[in-house]
Structures are given as C-alpha cells and as structure tokens.
C-alpha cells in the first residue's frame, strides 16, 4: 500500500465515483489544501482532487522533484489508473505542471477534457530568472507583496522558514523549466485565465498558450491579480465544471 508521501493526488470533495474530475495544481509554495474551499462548489457527479507536491503537508520530508516534467509524469501516472473524464487546472507554477501532465496523458492516447492555466506564461516563454537565488528576506518580501502569504504564517518564524525552503525549490523548478516540446503537443481545448494587474505575467504573451494545442483556445481576464483564483472563485469553478 502506498503511503501519502508516495502519492500525488488528494481527494478534497465531491462524488467518490464521479462523471468528471477537476484536478488542481497549486502555485509555488502551495499545497493541495489551497483548493479546499472549492469543494463546496462541487455538484452532483463531479469530484475535486488536488496535487500534493513533495516537501509539504503530509509529504513533508519527501525529496523535491527534479523537474516539472517529472512532476507531470507522476501525476499523469496516477490519473491514468482510472478512466474518468478530467479537467486540469493549474495556478502559476501549477499551470506548467498541468501542461506537462496533459502531455504525458496525450502520449497514452487519453487527453484531458480541458487544460486550464492561470497566472502563468506559456511554456515557450516560461523559465529563466534568478529569484530562487535571492536572500531569504528579499524572497519572502517579494512573495508577501503578491498577497499569497497569510499574516499568521509570516509571523511564525519557524514555520515561515520551512515554507520558504519549499518555495525556493518551487521557484527554482519554474525558473529552470524548459518545455518538453516545441509546438502543439495536445489537441484538447486550452483555457487561459489572467488576473488583471498581475505583476509576474506579461498579458501580451499569453496568446502563445494557443501554441500548445490544436484544439480551441480562449483567454479570460479576472480581477484579483496573481492570486485571482482564490478570490471570488465561484464563477471560476463553475466555468471549469461547465467547460467540457
């Protein structure tokens, strides 16, 4: 039997035998529980799962992944153990992990119903940067300025140090990322969500997400900046569940 630290998917709510699964991929430093509030919006026949990256929560102590491609391969392996229609939603770093997961699924002939990406540059424009080399104080200040850190966490020095270590590893994965393929690797629909005023994402480059698939592509602008997915999420979750 696999232990939680060896598996990647966490059940957050909805039907145990669903007709449709929504799989959520967290941002840098995030955990599966980041999406727990979305469980209240699961309707009959749907299920909410989230990915637990190594090194946090119930996977604390697990070795960090070597690449985003490795993460995508592991998640795809678990998803493909069941033949259930699936929507992938990735936030920030999670958008690239969701994309690489979809690529691995495509290689088996089973693509998701939709790849939804949020707050992330497309694969062809992603990677690069040296934020993961910044000092602890500088990195922590930058992350807090985006609104992704709760005040209680920031005030707990010991816990903040643990989170910062994980966060630095995640940012390094993002900055060292090189996409698996050039050009279209998918044929499913791709939907791109952008938080208005997001300082980390150049909105003029988001159209290149269309290059990853021969399927339909659309973009959606939302209030809330980089972490718009966790503000007024009701409309976003409804949009995802109604997408297929």
Image (tube, rainbow, N blue to C red):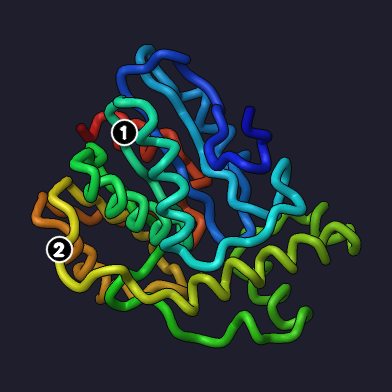
Task: Quote the CA–CA distance across marks 1 and 2.
Answer: 20 Å
* Residue in the picture at 62% in, 47% down: 31
Q: Position of residue 87 (x, y in %)?
A: 32, 37
Q: Kindly state the secondary structure of the residue where label 1 is placed.
A: strand
Q: Kindly state the secondary structure of the residue where label 2 is placed.
A: loop
Left or right of 32: which side holds 243?
A: left
Left or right of 132: which side holds 116?
A: left
Q: Position of residue 155 (x, y in %)?
A: 87, 60
* Residue in the picture at 20% in, 62% down: 212
Quarter containing the N terminus: top right
Look at mark 2 in the image and give the residue it sits on: 184
Rendered image quadrant of residue 243: top left
- Label 1 crowd (10 A; few <14 / some 14-19 / many >=20): many
* Residue in the picture at 65% in, 86% down: 133
Rendered image quadrant of residue 136: bottom right
Look at mark 1 in the image and give the residue it sits on: 86
Quarter containing the C terminus: top left
Q: Where is residue 238 in the image (x, y as percent from the top left)?
A: 34, 31
- Count the marks: 2
* Res. 244 in view: yes
State which tag comes first along the sequence, 1 or 2.
Answer: 1
* Residue in the picture at 51% in, 38% down: 50
Q: Which of 209 and 8 is in front in this view?
A: 8
* Res. 195 in view: no
Left or right of 142: which side holds 150?
A: right
On residue 239, the disc is: none
Q: Position of residue 125 (x, y in %)?
A: 31, 78
């Amino acid at each position: 039997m696999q232990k939680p630290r060896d598996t990647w998917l966490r059940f957050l709510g909805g039907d145990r035998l669903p007709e449709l699964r929504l799989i959520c991929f967290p941002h840098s430093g995030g955990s599966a529980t980041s999406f727990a509030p979305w469980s209240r919006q699961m309707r009959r026949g749907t299920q909410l799962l989230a990915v637990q990256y190594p090194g946090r929560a119930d996977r604390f102590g697990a070795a960090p992944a070597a690449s985003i491609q490795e993460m995508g391969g592991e998640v795809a392996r678990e998803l493909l153990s069941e033949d259930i229609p699936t929507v992938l939603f990735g936030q920030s770093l999670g958008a690239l992990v969701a994309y690489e997961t979809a690529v691995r699924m495509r290689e088996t002939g089973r693509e998701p119903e939709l790849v939804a990406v949020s707050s992330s540059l497309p694969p062809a424009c992603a990677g690069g940067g040296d934020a993961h080399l910044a000092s602890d104080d500088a990195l922590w200040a930058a992350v807090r300025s985006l609104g992704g850190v709760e005040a209680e966490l920031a005030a707990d020095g010991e816990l903040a140090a643990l989170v910062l270590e994980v966060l630095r590893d995640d940012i390094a994965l993002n900055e060292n990322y090189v996409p698996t393929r050039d050009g279209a690797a998918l044929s499913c629909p791709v939907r791109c969500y952008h938080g208005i005023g997001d300082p980390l994402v150049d909105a003029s480059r988001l159209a290149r997400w269309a290059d990853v698939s021969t399927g339909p592509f659309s973009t959606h602008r939302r209030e809330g900046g980089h972490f718009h997915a966790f503000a007024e999420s009701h409309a976003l979750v409804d949009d995802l569940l109604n997408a297929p």
